Every structure is written in structure tokens, then in C-alpha cells.
Image (cartoon, rainbow, N blue to C red):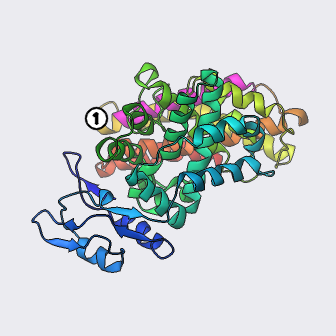
């Protein structure tokens, strides 16, 4: 809820989180737990006074003596009991894609969730999210449940580790409260443009900073929150970590995030989550992805949405895009290009190479896909096409601002990634 200075301190009220809190205050009782002062000692808001639009006006561009997050409380916001109710509803959902995976562990999940501690700062932000950004709150509960289920499998049922994993899952997107809602994953996943991506990539770091500086959650939980969009092969964000650079809890959370992202597609099932976790070799820990793949094998098979002729044509276009993209990069990016453009080109080569490896291992390039493989082929094709679009965003973000001739070269390179799939 605060702008983050170069020193990492939360100094001034962040407009996006404050807007969410004010919206939540229309239906919840959110009050000042302490008097709120600016850095000069001027009192801006009295203890026990409900928040209102007047608070937003008084806080505008004012540096505060204490982070605002620590000065407010949601009296009737999210509680352990309301969290358990949300989890129970998810576990009992008959139509949800996650139910077959979660239900066998329902009792253990509910027991561990009862031990999740809600720090006042986190309770405030979760309460605001529940009211103002319900999709984001529902996603947090799903991540909590899936993270817990995978930890049950990985730990042999050790309750302390399960509760820790569920806490990390619940809090993993707390940094999204600090960016405009239209740039959040739940609202912009399908149409995320470069500017939205530029905003989105900072949220894991903001979440880690918030938990580290304003709460007393363990360093393991805070670190995992910062790593939940990283991939083992270095293709994630915000720091492109590789292998052992990621913590065990971060690996778990990254696997969960990728699986849930796949399930956002209309009509998606556990099969789609399984495909997303294995379509590109080396992105995720196969031991963590395995339980989701095993659960997918127990549910009804996928059904292809496209006709075989249409699917075959789209697969052929994907094959062409992957085959030609590397040569296009080498042709369009001159050897004397700036460091920024070279860095973007090198990263693009690396990421496309990973996609080509996944494509080759799928075997779909060998011959025209048949009816029995159609649904699997469609899921692979959708996953790889989404990755190509993300590579374009990563390339543009990495390159930053370029001179006009280099910007034109970058445009052509990025167009080559996705134009064949239009």
C-alpha cells in the first residue's frame, strides 16, 4: 500500500491498495488502530476513526511516520474461521477442476489451515482483496489449498510444513495489491500487454518486501513469495533464478502458480495443468508436478475444441514459428547492436530453444495428429502459443527504450514470434 523507495522502506500510501481498502470500507469496518502522523509529526487521522475518502485526500504524497499498513485494521475482515469456510467451499465444489486433486486431503488441509496465523497487515490486505478484488482472493485460497496438497505429498504429512506451505500460497500475490487491478493476473491474463507485464513483474518482489519489512512471517515464506513466478531453467521473473537459486518452498509455489494459470482458461481441467507443467522440460520440479499429472489421469479425458483439420493447420503454424524464429533473430539483430537489444535477443533465443525442446519431445511434429491425440495436442499447442506471447513481452521488457532503428528490429523480431500463430 506504499510506494517503495530506493531503501525499500514503505513511506507513502500506495494509491492502488488504498483504493481497494477504501472500496472494502464500504462494506467492512476498517478503522485506524493508531493515530496516523506524517513524517513531520502532523496528525492526519485519529485512532478508532473509520477510513473514508477524506483519508485518501490527506495522505496524498505525504511521507508517513509509520507505514499506513501498520496503522489500519479490518474489524470484520478475513479471519481464520472465514478462511476455513472459503477453503471448505472450495473442497466441496463439485464442478471445480481442482476438486479431484484436493478432496482426498480435505481433512488434513482444513486442520493445517486452522493453524495459519493472520498478521494484522496481511489480514488488512486480504480483507481488502476479498471485497474489492474477489477473483484475486479466490485465487489466493486456491493456491493455499494446492500448495498444501503438494506439501502433504512431499513431506509425508508433516503438519508444520503443510501450514507453512499453505501460508505461502495464501500470501503469494499480496504484492498485487500494489499495482493497478487491470494489470493483475486474474484480470489481464489473456490480454496482458507489454505495459501490463512491466507492472506485473514487480509484484513478487513487492510481496517479499512487504512480508519482510512489515510482518514477522518467516524468511522462508517471504522468499517463496518472491520466487513464485521463477522457473528452474531461468525463464521466470523477476530475477530469472535457476535451479538451486530457488528455495524448496519457492519451487513448490512456482509449480502451483503455473498450474493455476493453466486452469484460468475456459473449460480447463487438471489435464491442462499437467500439460502446462511438463510442456517445456526443466521449468518445474518433476517430483512436484507428478501428483497433479497423476490426478489428471483419474478424471475424464480432455475433449478437443477444434476440428482435426483446424487443429492440424494450427499445429503446422506453430511448427513453422518455432523452426524459423531462431533464424529470424539472427537475421534481424545485428552484431553491433546495443547491449540492451543483444540481451533481449539472447534471452529470446534461450526461451525459444526451450520451447522447441518441448515441442520436439511432444512428438506432435512427426506426423499429422490423429483423433486420439487431438485433445492433448490442442493443450500442448495452447500452452506453447501462450509461451510465445510471453516471450515477446519478456523481450520487450528486457530491451527497454531503444533507438528508432533498433526498436524497429525488435518489433520485427517480436512479430516473428507470434504472427505465424495469429
For the residue pair 203 and 364, the one nearer the viewer reads as: 203
Where does residue 231 sit, x and y in percent of width and height? 50, 30
Please report the residue visible at 63 percent of the width from the left and 30 percent of the height from the top: 150
Where does residue 44 sit, x and y in percent of width and height? 21, 73
Query: Residue 258, located in which quarter of the rendered image?
Result: top right
Quarter of the N terminus within the rendering: bottom left
Q: Which residue reaches farthest bottom?
A: 54
Can residue 416 be seen at all in this image of the molecule? Answer: no
Q: Is residue 94 above or below residue 44?
A: above
For the residue pair 207 and 145, the one nearer the viewer reads as: 145
For the residue pair 117 and 98, the one nearer the viewer reads as: 117
Please report the residue visible at 17 percent of the width from the left and 72 percent of the height from the top: 43
Marker count (numbered)? 1
Is residue 314 toward the left or the right of residue 414 in the image?
Answer: right
Q: Is residue 24 above or below residue 362?
A: below
Is residue 306 toward the left or the right of residue 390 in the image?
Answer: right
How busy is the neighbourhood of tag 1: few (under 14 within 10 Å), some, or many (20 plus)?
few
Please report the residue visible at 59 percent of the width from the left and 30 percent of the height from the top: 355
Can residue 359 be seen at all in this image of the molecule? Answer: yes
Q: Is residue 27 above or below residue 265?
A: below
Please report the residue visible at 79 percent of the width from the left and 35 percent of the height from the top: 376
Majority secondary structure of magenta residues: helix
Q: Which residue is mark 1?
A: 339
Where does residue 322 sit, x and y in percent of width and height? 61, 33
Q: Judging from the image, what secondary structure is the residue with disc 1 in? A: helix
Segment colored magenta: 343-365
Where does residue 275 sit, x and y in percent of width and height? 70, 34
Residue 124 counted in the magenta span:
no
Q: Which residue reaches farthest right?
A: 371
Query: Residue 311, located in which quarter of the rendered image?
Result: top right
Amino acid at each position: 500500500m506504499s510506494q517503495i523507495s530506493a531503501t525499500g522502506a514503505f513511506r507513502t500510501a500506495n494509491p492502488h491498495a488504498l483504493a481497494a481498502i477504501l472500496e472494502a470500507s464500504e462494506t467492512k469496518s476498517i478503522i485506524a488502530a493508531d493515530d496516523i502522523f506524517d513524517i513531520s509529526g502532523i496528525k492526519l487521522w485519529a485512532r478508532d476513526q473509520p477510513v473514508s475518502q477524506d483519508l485518501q485526500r490527506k495522505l496524498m504524497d505525504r511521507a508517513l511516520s509509520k507505514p499506513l499498513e501498520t496503522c489500519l485494521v479490518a474489524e470484520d475482515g478475513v479471519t481464520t474461521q472465514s478462511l476455513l469456510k472459503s477453503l471448505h467451499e472450495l473442497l466441496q465444489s463439485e464442478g471445480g477442476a481442482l476438486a479431484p486433486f484436493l478432496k482426498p486431503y480435505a481433512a488434513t488441509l482444513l486442520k493445517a489451515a486452522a493453524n495459519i496465523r493472520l498478521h494484522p497487515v496481511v489480514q488488512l490486505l486480504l480483507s481488502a482483496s476479498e471485497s474489492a478484488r474477489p477473483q484475486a482472493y479466490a485465487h489466493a485460497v486456491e493456491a493455499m489449498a494446492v500448495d498444501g496438497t503438494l506439501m502433504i505429498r512431499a513431506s509425508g504429512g508433516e503438519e508444520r510444513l503443510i501450514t507453512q506451505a499453505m501460508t505461502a500460497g495464501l500470501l503469494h500475490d499480496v504484492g498485487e495489491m500494489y499495482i493497478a487491478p487491470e494489470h493483475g493476473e486474474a484480470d489481464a491474463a489473456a490480454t496482458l500487454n507489454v505495459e501490463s507485464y512491466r507492472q506485473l513483474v514487480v509484484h513478487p518482489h513487492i510481496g517479499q518486501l512487504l512480508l519482510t519489512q512489515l510482518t514477522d512471517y518467516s524468511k522462508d515464506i517471504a522468499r517463496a513469495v518472491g520466487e513464485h513466478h521463477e522457473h528452474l531453467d531461468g525463464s521466470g521473473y523477476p530475477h530469472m533464478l535457476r535451479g538451486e537459486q530457488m528455495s524448496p518452498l519457492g519451487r513448490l509455489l512456482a509449480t502451483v502458480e503455473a498450474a493455476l494459470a493453466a486452469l484460468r482458461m475456459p473449460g480447463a481441467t487438471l489435464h491442462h495443468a499437467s500439460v502446462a507443467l511438463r510442456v517445456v522440460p526443466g521449468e518445474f520440479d518433476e517430483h512436484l508436478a507428478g501428483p497433479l499429472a497423476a490426478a489428471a489421469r483419474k478424471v475424464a479425458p480432455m475433449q478437443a475444441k477444434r476440428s482435426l483439420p483446424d487443429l492440424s493447420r494450427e499445429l503446422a503454424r506453430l511448427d513453422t514459428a518455432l523452426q524459423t524464429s531462431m533464424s529470424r533473430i539472427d537475421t534481424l539483430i545485428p552484431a553491433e547492436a546495443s547491449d540492451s537489444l543483444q540481451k533481449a535477443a539472447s534471452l529470446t533465443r534461450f526461451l525459444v530453444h526451450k520451447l522447441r525442446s518441448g515441442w520436439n519431445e511432444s512428438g506432435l511434429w512427426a506426423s499429422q495428429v490423429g483423433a486420439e491425440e487431438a485433445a492433448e495436442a490442442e493443450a500442448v499447442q495452447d500452452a506453447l502459443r501462450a509461451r510465445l506471447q510471453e516471450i515477446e513481452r519478456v523481450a520487450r521488457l528486457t530491451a527497454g527504450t531503444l533507438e528508432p532503428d533498433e526498436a524497429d528490429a525488435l518489433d520485427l523480431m517480436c512479430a516473428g514470434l507470434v504472427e505465424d500463430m495469429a
